[in-house]
Amino acid sequence: EPEVTQTPSHQVTQMGQEVILRCVPISNHLYFYWYRQILGQKVEFLVSFYNNEISEKSEIFDDQFSVERPDGSNFTLKIRSTKLEDSAMYFCASRRQGGSNEKLFFGSGTQLSVL
Amino acid sequence: KNQVEQSPQSLIILEGKNCTLQCNYTVSPFSNLRWYKQDTGRGPVSLTIMTFSENTKSNGRYTATLDADTKQSSLHITASQLSDSASYICVVSASGGSYIPTFGRGTSLIVHP
């Protein structure tokens, strides 16, 4: 089965530093998402992206966050100035169509640790 | 506000036993409900999808049920295996408007030999 791939699998950074998390969605998918999961808590929606623009974002996704699809394959999440509370597992997800019945395919995640 | 509540929070069972996980939701208008399995350190993987008209759906040893009237779903795992140890997440989507699904906190299942 095709996979969403994420790199790196682990990222350690100092508070205040910028980080870029990378994702390669499944090739024929059109809708892309970022979620995060703080240790022991539920998966939380951050942002959805379609047709080269943000379609929805949560209140977590503030001005410190940005997303980009720099080429035809990559989808990135940038955190401009990391805070301790940004430490979490970040999941990229994609789906072929945007309808609610369409299955979301998740990557294996990037574990971000902010020190 | 759309919410998904799961119980129990955690469950320990012996290999070979059956178990049932519960999900209650208040998402409206309802579109579908998915159960995901999340292995430790991995992304969630979809097990089943239930739409409004479906009461029961099976995927191997996993059987999901849906009662749209009471807004409840269950996931039954038969003859558990060690590899079933994971977090099981109930995710409910609304129809119309936002297609962003609402996630439950998950049930952590541990299967002991």
Image (cartoon, grey):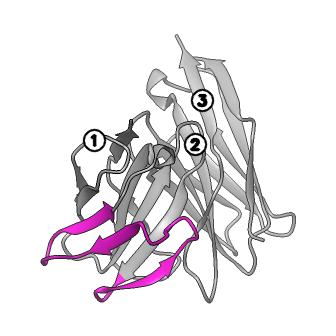
The magenta segment: A50-79
When asked about the image quadrant of residue B88, the answer is top right
Residue corresponding to mark 1:
A11
Q: Please tell me whether mark 2 sits on a helix, a strand or a loop.
A: strand
Residue corresponding to mark 3:
B109
Amino acid tagged 3: Leu
When asked about the image quadrant of residue B19, the answer is top right
Q: Residues within 10 Å of mark 1 (few under 14, many from 20)?
A: some
Q: Earlier in the sequence, mark 2 or mark 3?
A: 2
Position of residue A25 measured from the top left corner of the image (x, y, whole percent):
25, 66
> Residue under mark 3: which chain is it in?
B
Quadrant where the image shows the N terminus of chain B: bottom right
Q: Please tell me which residue lies in front, A104 or A67.
A: A67
Up/down of B58 relative to A46, above or below: above
Query: Disc 2 vs disc 3: Cβ atoms closer than 8 Å?
Result: yes
Indicate which label's residue lies in the foreground, 2 or 1.
1
Tag of residue B88: 2
Q: Is residue B110 magenta?
A: no
Question: In the image, what residue occupies the spot 65% across and 47% down?
Answer: B105
Amino acid tagged 2: Tyr
What distance separates the C-alpha of mark 2 from that of mark 3? 7 Å
Q: Residues within 10 Å of mark 3 (few under 14, many from 20)?
A: some
